[in-house]
Amino acid sequence: MSALFQPITVAGIRIRNRIVLPPMVREHGDDDGCVTDAVLAYYRRRAAAGTGLIIVEATAVEPAGRTWPGGLCAYAPAHVAGLTALASAIHAEGAAAILQLVHGGPKATPQVSGRETVAPSAVQPSGSRTMPRALTVEGIQAMQGHFAAAAGMAMEAGFDGVEVHGAHGYLLDAFLSRKYNVRADAYGGTMENRVRVLAETCRAIRARLGADALLGCRISLFNKLHEGFSHDDLVTLVNGLEAGGIELLHVSTLSVFEAYFDVEKSLGQQVKVLSDLPVIVAGGLRQPAEAERAISEGHGDLAAVGTAMMRNPDWSLCATDALLGE
């Protein structure tokens, strides 16, 4: 039996196989961040192909957190109906459905949000982005409340859980950065302090969700390695997330997965040594055989297939044919 097609249960949610559609923003929403027919069609098609878990693209938790024109949102009453239809469409095709929640922070787009950008510290982001305003402690607490409220909306809409976007330089990830977080309070300095905002945010969401919904978190290390991010930092991060109540860890590498298949321990394997949490691995998986190997060799418990499934909505069906001969 193919390892990729073994079912798995995470936090009481049964997932029919190990194939994951990771969150990739498609900009198919309307100007207000509501779900459209194009959004429904995109996710329904990939669920219908047999994908086990659909993680819906980064969804803004408040207006100031918006980054993409046509990006989805989960903070206004007008968003509920579309999110409900989206969760229903995914479930109707047999897949589990998780909504990823994000605050763009220093990567938010004022032309979309209509607001100034915020960050851990007033440090100029890379590129031509505007100088952000450093969040006060009160601002951090308000932001955490927005995440919890958005998680509540996701549950109202019928999703199986939510994933916190703690990767790729967006607000929660920026707190982990030595470069972009130069705070001198309880949220800056040591790695324990820099993890605090992310862990507290997860804890606030966990409290809002109760025990009946899955809470995951996506992290990335590739954008922090140049800052000297160490194995000890990874230990602190994973421990903080566990204390925050997460039940699924999504490791984003943004590199070709084949590149680290033959190293002593892949990033996914390193995380699995540190924690009993199930792990999603992502990063350049294209062919069914690559995803199969990622699971069978213990790099992760689930395999995220991003660009390949974006281009081929029937990727999971093709994987069934390739690996099961059906």
Image: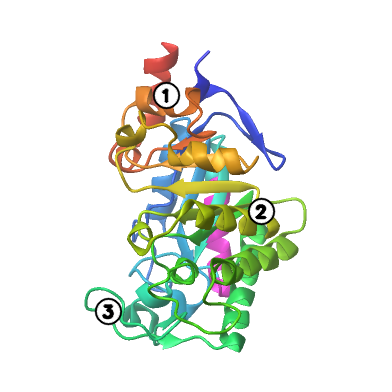
Q: Residues within 10 Å of mark 1 (few under 14, many from 20)?
A: some
User: Whole-Å distance between the Cαs marked 2 and 3?
Assistant: 33 Å
In what quadrant of the picture does the C terminus appear?
Answer: top left
The boundaries of the magenta stretch are 75-89
Residue for point 45% across, 75% down: 65
Instruction: Please tell me in which quadrant of the rendered image residue 152 appears.
Output: bottom right
Secondary structure character of the magenta stretch overall: helix
As displayed, is residue 325 above or below residue 141?
above
| Residue behind mark 3 | 129
Secondary structure of residue under mark 1: helix
The amino acid type found where label 3 is placed reads Arg
- Please tell me whether residue 240 is drawn above or below residue 118 in the rendered image: above
Residue in the foreground of this view, choosing between 223 and 54: 223
**Residue 41: percent from left, percent from top:** 40, 47
Q: Position of residue 101 (x, y in %)?
A: 52, 62
Q: Nearer the viewer, mark 1 or mark 2?
A: 2
Q: Is tag 1's residue or tag 3's residue first in the polypeptide sequence?
A: 3
- Mark sitting on residue 92: none
The residue under label 2 is which amino acid type?
A: Glu
Q: What is the distance, in whole Å, between disc 1 and disc 3 at their CAs? A: 40 Å
Please tell me whether mark 2 sits on a helix, a strand or a loop. helix
